[in-house]
Image (cartoon, rainbow, N blue to C red):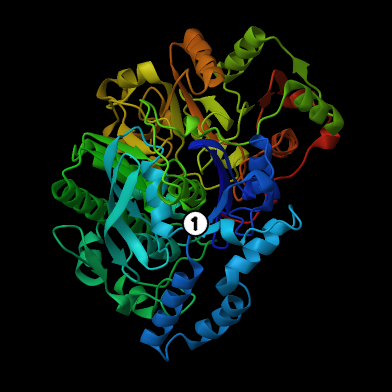
Amino acid sequence: MKILGISAYYHDSAAALIEDGTIVAAAQEERFTRKKHDSGFPAKAIAYCLEAGRSSLRDVDFVVFYDKPFLKFERLLETYLAFAPNGFVSFQAAMPIWLKDKLFQKNMLIKELGKSAPGLRLDDRLLFSEHHMSHAASAFYPSPFEEAAILTMDGVGEWATTSIGVGKGAELSILKELHFPHSLGLLYSAFTYYTGFKVNSGEYKLMGLAPYGKPVYADIIQKHLIDVKEDGSFRLNQEYFGYCTGLRMTNRKFDLLFGGPARRPADRIEQRHMDLAASIQAVTEDVILRIARAVRRDTGMKNLCLAGGVALNCVSNGKLQRANVFDRIWIQPASGDAGGAVGAALAAYHQHAGRSRSVSAADSMRGGYLGPEYTQQEIEKSLSSAGACFAVLSDNEFLDTVASHLADGKAVGWFQGRMEFGPRALGGRSILGDARSPTMQKNLNLKVKYRESFRPFAPSVLSEDVAEWFDFEGVSPYMLLVAEVREDRRRKMTRAEQELFGIEKLNVPRSEIPAATHVDYTARLQTVHRDTNPRYYDLISRFKDLTGTPVLVNTSFNVRGEPIVSTPDDAFRCFMGTGIDILAIGNCVLEKEKQDPALKLDYKDAFELD
């Protein structure tokens, strides 16, 4: 049985194909269109998934959309009626779009799908899953657990913003929900907006900014904005927010509460913004821990699965893991709306079609490597057409050469195997650097990624060596857990360094791997495993042989505002438009200094701020 899952029309459109319960392929539309967070119909992602599954749309048993448009329209309409006459301008702008397109998405989907299969009738094969059921299914069904509690948290689906469920075998049921407008995701996004970052993409910046501040506003948030009960259930005080009635997340009363208007994106980041980031992060962690403890108590489950946009908050995930509320935690690597395509397809397979589920010791996301890959011949043809100068090496020569470049402090664009599904680069489409370098973080941020200097980078560490470098037990293959660097790997700071505030902390080396150590001695870990990514594992092993350090800095292969590269052409353009020194693609190695200067591009302002 083949099932195609689709997520579209909000943000991060994606497609996924499963065959007999196995995830064959999954990808976000943005990787093909080169439009960040592309929300359009995922025609290119669907075409890729069908090609990867050696299928056509005629071979697919069901097509499943990840939410129910009529329920979402009901929420929109009821919200406007509840707050009327406030929000009429927003209502007037939204209604024509809904009445023209979104309300009749079934017809739209049939029309779009029909473009690739003219004459094919899909009415009886098109299904719709509820938004949080899609998230829950994406969390539980690929997990390595026979049974588990399931917690999904995001901005909002149709009505639900937080849901608690239980999965046993192939059965999955939602037990409790919190409904809009009371949303932990929207609360976090309100502070994302207020501190000058873009909603639905800048939340991870807010998380990265938090360690530079102190949670001095946490009490104010808890007193005025959110009423949290012991079991983690909560209500938001709508007097301070604008998302129900307008196009702003916050309002004038919110501005007065926190001492001024929202920061504009081009404005300087001040200590107040860092403290706000620290405060909302602390409140978020408190709420999640309360919910988790209640879920454990109420369900009796030893395992927990997480999905939804809030599950991408790896700092909260790390705190939750260290709290030992559950024996084991598994987080869907594509926890946002893109992952809803996988969840919708799996929900249809196990619930609608009634098919059984098999569980393995590892999860069934295949390391997250579910996107396109290219043969050596295709790579060489692409590079030659672009006018690139490259050397083709044997496997051993290739790994030795790239490891040597890394040990020499070079920034390496690493393009190997299948592209990752989800927001993280996991060693398929990555930019790599030497974690020992005290200047690598600054260089990668400013000269390669063209983004804010405070942004931290993740360490990729050999799975068997993780406990030698971090206070961490277990695995973190998807870069979704934060752990502290071990005490004996830290550098003792001077008194003057300890007294630094805010962004002044940035350039102080804090450990033996300063490029991957955040200002609070934490790191967003990726454990690298031979069985899921043997080539990346072998590269880090060669680097360890050269340097004694089994850790590399890993960041996504793109610049600020650009989707992660997908094709060899994308990779070469990004290489020539940035400060990347070396491109390692297939078995080809390209050195920047050997390229034709006429091919150089200026990527610094090529994409919008993310």
Task: Report x, y in % for residue 184.
Answer: 32, 61
Q: Tell me if I can see residue 63 in this picture.
A: yes
Kindly identify the residue that appears in the image at 19 percent across and 39 percent down. 323
Q: Residue at x 20, y 58 (%)?
A: 232
Disc 1 residue crowd, few under 14, some 14–19, many 20+, Cα 10 Å: many
Nearer the observer, 39 or 225: 39
Measured as percent of width and height from the top left, residue 256 is found at 33, 76
**148 sits left or right of 58 in the view:** left
Query: Would you name the residue on which mark 1 appears?
Result: 66
Quadrant including the N terminus: top right
Q: Is residue 562 visible?
A: no
In the image, residue 553 sits, relative to residue 7, either above or below, namely: above
Name the quadrant containing residue 496. Answer: top left
Of residues 120 and 247, the one drawn nearer to the viewer in this rendering: 120
The amino acid type of the residue labelled 1 equals: Tyr
Identify which residue, 297 or 398, lies in the foreground: 297
Is 119 located above or below residue 145 in the figure?
Answer: below
Which residue occupies 49% across, 56% down? 66
Look at the picture and state if 302 lies above or below 83: above
Q: Nearer the viewer, residue 585 or 17?
A: 17
Q: Position of residue 584 (x, y in %)?
A: 66, 23
Mark 1: secondary structure: loop
